Amino acid sequence: MCEKCKGNFYITTPIYYPSAKLHIGHTYCTVATDAMARYKRMQGYNVKFLTGTDEHGQKIEDKAKEAGITPKQFVDNIVTGEGGVLDLWKLMNISYDRFIRTTDDYHVEAIQKIFKKMYENGDIYKGTYKGKYCKPCESFWTESQLVDGKCPDCGREVQDAEEEAYFFRLSKYADRIQDLLENTDYLEPRSRVNEMVNNFIKPGLEDLCVSRTSFSWGVPVDFDPGHVVYVWIDALFNYMTALGFQNDKYHDLEEFWPADVHFVGKEIVRFHSIIWPAMLMSLDLPLPKKVYGHGWLLLDGGKMSKSKGNVVDPYILAERFGVDALRFFLLRSFPFGSDGNFSNELLINTINVDLANDLGNLVSRTVAMAQKYFGEHLPAQQQADEEKDAELLAMASGLRDKYEEQMEKFAFQNALAEIFKVISRANKYIDENAPWVLAKSEEQKPRLARVLYNLLETVRICAGLLTPFMPDTAAEIAKRLGGADLSWDTLNQFGTLSAEAATVAGPALFPRIDMEKELAALEEMNKPAPEVVEDPLPEPLPEIAFDQFEKVEMTVVKVLACENVKKSEKLLKFTLDDGSKEPRQILSGVAKYYKPEELVGKTLIAVTNLAPRKMMGQLSCGMLLSAERGDELHLVMLPDYVRAGSRLV
Ligand code: ME8
C-alpha cells in the first residue's frame, strides 16, 4: 500500500455469463461498481476493481454446439469480439483494474487445486446425485426447493437428474452461516437476510452437488476424469484467484483479501451469502466483509428482454444519449437495493430534467454571465458575502459530508439527490440575486462578482462529487471553470477556486431531447425484423434429355427502352438489342417489381427462339429469364461487359 493511501479497497462485480450480448440490466451493476471504485479512489484508497466473465457450463456448451463452433470460440466472440463485453466496458468508461476470464489457465489450475483441497479435508465427498436441475440457471434444486414444481429462480421447467457426483458438506456450515447472516453486516440490504434465512437455511441446508459428468465444458476434476467442477465453485473463487490465490500469475492476495464488497444481483445472493462463505470456512479463509444484493431493472414489471418495445441495448442507448447520461440515469433513477422499472421515457425525462435543465443550465448560465459581465476572469475585488448567501454556502460546503454518508451505504440515488438539492438551490440563487439587474450599475459590480463566484464555486463542488458518476462531464465542467481543482480534499471547502476564476464557454452539456421524436425513433429501431416466411419449393419438373435442353436458345440482350403497357398492371414492354441489327420486342410480367426507367441499359438473358405471341394486343418475341420464389422476383442480370448476342451454353 502506498504511504499516502487511506487503505486498500477491493470491490468486485459478478462475472458475466457470455452466453448472449449484455443488456442495460447487466450494465447497471458494473456502472455502480465503477462509481464506487472511482469514489474510493477519489477519497484516497488504493482500489482494486475486479470484473470478468464466467465462461463454463452446459448452457455455453449447448449454445456453441448450436452455432457449430467450439465453446472457446463461442465465448471469445462474446468477450473479446467486436461489440463484446470488453468493448462494452470500454465504451461505458469502466475503470476496472483487473479482468478475469474463468477459462484463463491460471484460474483453471487454481480451481483444480481448490477442489482437491476440499476433497482432502473431507468437505467434498463422492455420492449419487438425485434431484432436479435447471439448465438455464445451471442450478441444482431439491424437490422441496421447487416452486410449483419449477425452478425457484427463473420459474422454468427443471429436469430429473441422477448421476455419480461429488458433494460439498454445506449442511455442516448451516449454523455458522445463519449466525453470519443474522448477527453481522455481511449481507445487505438487511431485507435480503430474512429471505436467505427463511427460504434456504431454516428449511435445512442440504449438501451441494459440486461436480457434473453430463457435459464437459468446465474445469476437469483432475483426480477423477469425466467429472467437471460445478460452475458456481469455479465462478465464486474468481474473486480470489484473480488476486493470486493458488496461482503465481498475481500476487495481491495479502493486500486485497478479504474483499471490501461484492456487488451482486439479487438472484445470486444465495450463492454469495450461503455457498461462498461456507466454502471459505471450509478452507479456513477470511470471509469478504460484505455482499450487497442490488435490485433488478425491470421492463413493465418483468424481466428485461429485447422484445418489449423499449431499447435495452447499451450500445444504442450510449450512442443516442451519451455514456455519462446513461451512467447517471442508472444510478439516479433507481434505489440500488430494490427493483426499478426501466423505460426509455424515464431515461429521456431524467436527462431533460436533471441534466439539461438543472445541471446543464446552471453551468451554462453561470459561465455565460461571468464572461458577459467580466470577460475571461472575475475581478479580484469582490464584495463580502451577505446574509442571503449563507444558505447556498452552507449547503455547498456541507454537501460532501452528506454525499459521503450516502455513498458509504451504497445509496447512489440518495447521494445524487443531495447534489441535485444544491444544484436547485444554486439555480434559485441566480433568480434571487438577478445578476442581470446587478450588472446595470457600476457600483454593484463587486457584488455581482461575488454572486458569480459563489455560483462557480458551487458548480465546482457539485462537479467534483459527480465525478464517480459522470467522469467526462465532471472533467469538462472543470475545464469550463478554468481548470478547477476537483480533488476530494477541496470538495468540503468553499472558496478553493481562485477569486479571479477564469471561465471557458462551451456548447450545452446536455441538449434537451424531444421526447416524442426520440421515443418514435427508438420504437422504429426496435421493430422486429420481418419474419421470413418459408414458402414451399415448387414441384420438380420431369427429366428432359440434353438434346431437348439444347433446343432452347438463350441470348444475352441489352435493354434499349422499357415502358409500361397501357391497361396492364403486370406487363412491361422491352425493346432489346439481341446482337442482331433488328431491335427485339418482349413483354414481360415484371411491372410489380421494377420501374421501367431502372431497367434501361441493363444486361439480361432472353429465350429468343420461342414462338412469338400476342399479349394485350402487342407482339412478344421471346421471354426474359427471372428467378422467382414466393413473393420475390429478380430478373437475371449480367455484368455490362457481357456483349449483346452472346449465347448461353
Ligand atoms: O449471474 N437488472 O452472470 P449473469 C439488474 N455468472 N441486474 C441484472 C439484470 C437486470 N435486469 N439482469 C442481469 C451471473 N443482471 C454469474 C455470476 S459471480 C461469481 C457469477 C445482473 O451474466 C445479475 O443480477 O447472468 C448478475 O448480478 C449480473 O447481471 C450478471 O449476470
Image: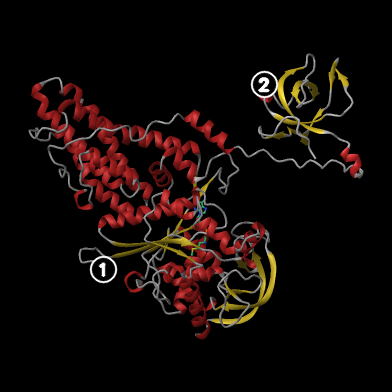
Q: Secondary structure at mark 2?
A: helix
Front position in the image: 114 or 194: 114
Does 553 sit left or right of 497 as displayed? right
Viewer-nearest residue: 514 or 289 = 514
As drawn, 560 above or below 196: above
**Cα–Cα span, label 2 and label 1:** 76 Å
Which residue sits at x=79%, y=14%? 567
Q: Nearer the viewer, mark 2 or mark 1?
A: 2
Picture disc at residue 132: none
The residue positioned 79% from the left and 25% from the top of the image is 589
Residue 140 lies, in percent from the top left, at 61, 68
Q: Which mark is residue 597?
A: 2
Dividing the picture into quadrants, the one containing residue 370 is top left
Provide the residue designation for mark 1: 1
Vertical placement of 160 versus 420: above or below? below
Residue 554 locus on image (x, y percent): 81, 34
Q: Earlier in the sequence, mark 2 or mark 1?
A: 1
Q: Residues within 10 Å of mark 2 (few under 14, many from 20)?
A: few
Q: Which quadrant, please, contains the C terminus?
A: top right
- Residue 420 in percent (x, y) is at 32, 40
Q: Is mark 2 within 8 Å of ligand 1?
A: no
Coloring basis for residues = secondary structure
Residue 552: which quarter of the image?
top right
